[in-house]
Image (cartoon, grey):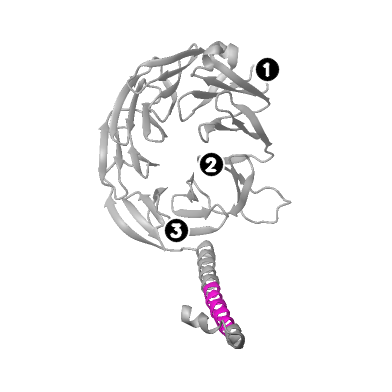
């Protein structure tokens, strides 16, 4: 290189130097344009592939694994921690995606009810007094409730909130997974109304209760929040906040995550937020009758019958999906008469006795199929196109195509 530039030190060789520098610049520009072209082409391919996947619709499936059902027809199934939870009157078991048993726990219950949260499961005999606490590794402890059980909610350390009742009063208690009583509270109807639903935070520190009062002829609901941590110790009865809604029934209340609560009423949806003392952050008045409610940690959805004549659609149902702040993400119209609806991190699943539909959060129907056998439920997996299909005869792991 030094020899080349030594040639250009002489005045007579300046023109040759300029020509040489011009060629170097042109070569660099050529390489730069080639890199840009490759980048643009690559970006175009990625965008086209993304659009293709976004718009792609599946209408068939392949069976990856299958196992004949040997359980009772009344058995129920849920997704739990990426696998399958199966429970009935005789016991509860945890299965992998190919229906291989990870663990099982036998019991005898008349009407088993289940609550799951993070790694923990609580199963109780409704109107009985037994509760079993389990996690992904199996049995963790047994709880004997003081009164007949109405509802249970488990937190992510195995703490269980229990709503109980007898002829005289209702009771709300909290137990650890070994059965030790942590909180005991008696609820008198003349003081608060009838507790119709409870919700428990992930950390087991906050409890939300929906109370219904019809003593004055019209329904009135109070949503009350209790704190079992240090903040609640400073309040009477650990009650840290409460809100009353006239002429409203709120039969369902859920913690979307540890600090955000959604209360679903017959004519409104209310959102609350607070790490210690939840406050009302949004109240949505609903004019249509809500047919179904579904939610995950970040979103919730409502389904209505399409009776609004101002909407330009002939579909039977309207489904609205919201984020945790109450902002609407998408509205989907559909016709399928469903019996189950689920929401996971990516998809909305609707199923009936014979059909299944899967929608994206953008409102695209990715899959619709009519099955030959009676369909019990469809369970999403962590794999984008794989689902657990439970029919009256088999449990199948499928991949839509």
* Residues tagged 1 and 2 counted as in contact (Cβ below 8 A): no
Label 3 CA crowd tier, 10 Å (few <14, some 14–19, many 20+): some
Residue 45: percent from left, percent from top? 51, 70
The secondary structure that most of the magenta stretch takes on is helix
In terms of image quadrants, where is residue 293?
top right
Q: Residue 370 has which mark?
A: 3
Label 1 CA crowd tier, 10 Å (few <14, some 14–19, many 20+): few
Q: Secondary structure at mark 1?
A: loop
30 is within the stretch colored magenta: yes
One can see residue 358 in this view: yes
Q: Nearer the viewer, residue 117 or 302?
A: 117
Q: Give the spatial CA distance, label 2 vs label 3.
A: 30 Å
Location of mark 1 (residue): 216
Residue 101: percent from left, percent from top? 25, 43
In terms of image quadrants, where is residue 116?
top left
Name the residue: 67% across, 34% down: 283
**Which label's residue is closer to the chain start, 1 or 2?**
1
Q: Nearer the viewer, residue 245 or 247?
A: 245
Q: Give the spatial CA distance, label 1 vs label 2.
A: 37 Å
Q: Residue 298 has which mark?
A: 2
Q: Quadrant of the C terminus?
A: bottom left
Over which residues does the magenta segment extend?
20-37
């Amino acid at each position: 290189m030094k020899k080349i530039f030594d040639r250009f030190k002489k005045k007579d060789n300046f023109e040759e130097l300029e020509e040489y520098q011009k060629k170097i610049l042109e070569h660099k520009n050529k390489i730069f344009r080639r890199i840009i072209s490759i980048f643009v082409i690559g970006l175009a391919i990625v965008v086209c592939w993304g659009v293709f996947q976004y718009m792609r619709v599946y209408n068939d499936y392949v069976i990856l694994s299958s196992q004949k059902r040997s359980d009772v027809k009344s058995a129920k199934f849920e997704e739990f921690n990426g696998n399958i939870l199966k429970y009935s009157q005789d016991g509860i078991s945890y299965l992998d995606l190919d229906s291989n048993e990870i663990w099982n726990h036998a019991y005898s219950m008349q009407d088993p009810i289940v609550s799951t949260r993070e790694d923990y499961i609580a199963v109780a005999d409704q109107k009985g007094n037994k509760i079993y606490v389990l996690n992904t590794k199996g049995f963790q402890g047994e709880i004997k409730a003081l009164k007949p059980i109405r509802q249970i909610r488990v937190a992510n350390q195995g703490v269980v909130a229990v709503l109980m009742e007898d002829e005289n009063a209702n009771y709300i208690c909290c137990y650890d997974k070994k059965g030790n009583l942590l909180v005991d509270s008696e609820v008198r109807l003349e003081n608060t109304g009838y507790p119709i639903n409870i919700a428990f935070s992930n950390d087991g520190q906050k409890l939300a209760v929906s109370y219904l009062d019809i003593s004055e002829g019209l329904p009135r609901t109070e949503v009350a929040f209790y704190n079992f941590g240090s903040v609640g110790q400073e309040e009477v009865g650990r009650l840290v906040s409460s809100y009353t809604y006239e002429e409203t029934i709120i039969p369902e209340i859920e913690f979307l995550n540890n600090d955000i609560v959604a209360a679903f009423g017959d004519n409104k949806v209310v959102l609350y937020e607070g790490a210690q003392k939840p406050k009302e952050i949004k109240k949505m008045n609903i004019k249509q009758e809500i047919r179904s409610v579904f939610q995950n940690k970040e979103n919730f959805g409502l389904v209505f019958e399409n009776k609004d004549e101002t909407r330009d659609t002939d579909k039977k149902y309207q489904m609205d999906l919201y984020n945790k702040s109450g902002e609407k993400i998408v509205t989907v119209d559909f016709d399928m008469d469903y019996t189950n609806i689920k929401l996971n991190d990516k998809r909305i699943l609707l199923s009936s006795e014979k059909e299944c539909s899967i929608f994206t959060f953008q409102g695209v129907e990715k899959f619709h199929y009519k099955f030959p056998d009676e369909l019990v439920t469809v369970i999403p997996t962590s794999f984008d196109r794989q689902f657990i299909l439970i029919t009256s005869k088999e449990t199948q792991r499928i991949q839509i195509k």
